[in-house]
């Protein structure tokens, strides 16, 4: 078993001789992955100013965050088969170049309507860009080293939503919101140069896939018609709605309802994402100690459901709502996500060992698109100084808990 985890192909041996040092490769791939989070979250402290510039309301400006999620879902679904056909290096270069163009279009958008169109396009491009580095790491390394380096990639990626509003807030205060996107263009231009000069194509020529729409559609249908897998998709998507809810809905609550300074807002989102990162690392430790992913997931969702008492307590006692109380309750909501989403994903993928890539792309598409649509609709509801967000989060968590226990009683025996 140890040998199989360490095994590498002749192509990988040759490829590793052509690569730049790991200290350059992994940070580069991490930065390209983080860009998708940065373009979606960095401008949240500037929403009030952007609403004035585009002659729209704050509620309308909130929606452009969710439109980006829809685009990212489409990008992952579309580009997954394409990078298996045309290669990873080309995907990085083309998506980075298109990313520069779409960001320049964002800066010069003539109206709110055009801004919506551009944001969806931005999501498609950066969704594809962020998905490619993980595939490249899998191309390059043995299974064991893939797990090690991909863990770094995921951890660095999660710092994107945490740091983006913080960095974006200071850029906005010092230079204006346009420079948030100029900064992304500069990073992408440097990345194109590095990829062109130093990064080889990682796709093994013997593994190039043809694009057969009929077969891809057949695989998607097989996944959706597998009942336990469909239940896991639904459960994971609902929990993702709770995860994505706070970056989309919280900025207006804090900036408008509580008059929080834009440069301070990022510290609060950083704390929430940091809690999720801690959860992921602790979950990794439970796996190393031999605990069942399914049972860890069940324990986490049960405790998380209990914590929703805090959500409904604040909703029923609005006089207790404040910047501090909202962030504390959201912290209770977020802290246990790290024990659930990854374990649900592993359980889901065990049903499709023969088509992992297709299964991942479909799951990611649904987990981005449905929350994007749902959260876009939620922005139209009255905020009630954060009570609406806390109530919706609490309801989603309770539904996920019920769905998790239903899955365990219906299909859990297959994993004992």
Image (tube, rainbow, N blue to C red):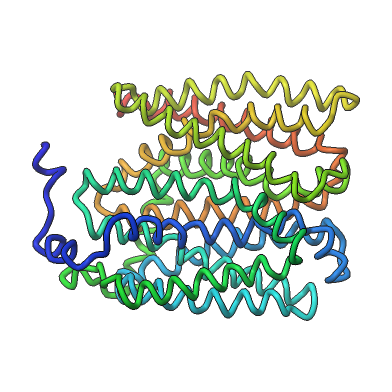
- Residue 103 rendering spot, x and y as whole percentages: 62, 74
Nearest the eye: 129 or 25: 25
- Residue 203's place in the image compared with 349, above or below, is below
Query: In percent of the image, x 63 and y 18: which residue is there?
Result: 306
Query: In percent of the image, x 47 and y 53: which residue is there?
Result: 364
Residue placed farthest to the right in the image?
Answer: 319
Specify the quadrant that holds the C terminus: top left
- Residue 97 rendering spot, x and y as whole percentages: 49, 78
In which image quadrant can residue 241 be found?
top right
Query: In percent of the image, x 14 and y 45: which residue is there?
Result: 6
- Residue 248 rendering spot, x and y as whole percentages: 70, 50
Q: Is residue 270 left or right of residue 32?
A: right
Residue placed farthest to the front in the image?
Answer: 174
- Residue 408 rendering spot, x and y as whole percentages: 43, 25
Nearest the eye: 366 or 279: 279
- Residue 395's place in the image compared with 159, above or below, is above
Q: Is residue 370 left or right of residue 295?
A: right
Query: In percent of the image, x 35 and y 56: which residue is there?
Result: 26
Specify the quadrant that holds the N terminus: top left
């Amino acid at each position: 078993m140890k040998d199989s985890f360490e095994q590498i192909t002749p192509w990988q041996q040759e490829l590793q001789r052509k690569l730049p040092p790991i200290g350059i490769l992994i940070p580069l791939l991490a930065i390209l992955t983080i860009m998708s989070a940065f373009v979606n979250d960095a401008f949240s402290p500037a929403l009030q100013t952007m609403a004035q510039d585009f002659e729209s309301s704050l509620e309308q400006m909130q929606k452009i965050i969710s439109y980006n999620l829809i685009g990212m879902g489409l990008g992952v679904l579309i580009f997954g088969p394409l990078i298996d056909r045309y290669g990873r290096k080309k995907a990085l270069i083309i998506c980075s170049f298109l990313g520069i163009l779409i960001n320049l279009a964002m800066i010069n958008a003539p109206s709110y309507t055009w801004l919506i169109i551009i944001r969806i396009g931005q999501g498609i491009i950066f969704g594809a860009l962020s998905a490619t580095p993980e595939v490249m790491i899998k191309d390059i390394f043995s299974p064991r080293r893939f797990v090690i380096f991909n863990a770094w990639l995921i951890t660095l990626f999660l710092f994107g939503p945490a740091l983006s509003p913080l960095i974006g807030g200071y850029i906005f205060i010092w230079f204006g919101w346009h420079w948030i996107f100029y900064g992304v263009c500069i990073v992408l231009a440097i990345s194109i140069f590095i990829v062109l000069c130093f990064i080889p194509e990682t796709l093994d020529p013997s593994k190039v896939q043809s694009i057969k729409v009929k077969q891809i559609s057949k695989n998607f249908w097989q996944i959706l018609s597998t009942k336990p897998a469909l239940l896991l998709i639904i459960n994971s998507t609902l929990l993702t709605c709770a995860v994505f809810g706070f970056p989309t809905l919280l900025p207006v609550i804090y900036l408008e309802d509580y008059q929080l300074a834009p440069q301070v807002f990022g510290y609060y989102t950083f704390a929430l994402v940091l809690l999720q990162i801690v959860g992921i690392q602790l979950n990794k430790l439970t796996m190393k100690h031999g605990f069942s992913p399914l049972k860890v997931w069940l324990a986490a969702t049960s405790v998380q459901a209990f914590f929703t008492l805090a959500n409904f307590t604040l909703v029923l006692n609005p006089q207790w709502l404040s910047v501090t109380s909202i962030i504390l309750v959201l912290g209770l909501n977020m802290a246990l996500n790290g024990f659930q989403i990854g374990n649900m994903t592993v359980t889901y993928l065990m049903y499709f060992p023969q088509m992992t890539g297709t299964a991942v792309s479909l799951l990611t598409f649904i987990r981005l698109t449905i929350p994007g649509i749902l959260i876009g609709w939620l922005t139209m509801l009255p905020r009630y100084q954060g009570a609406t967000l806390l109530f919706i989060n609490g309801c989603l968590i309770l539904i996920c808990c019920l769905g998790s226990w239903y899955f365990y009683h219906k299909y859990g025996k297959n994993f004992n």
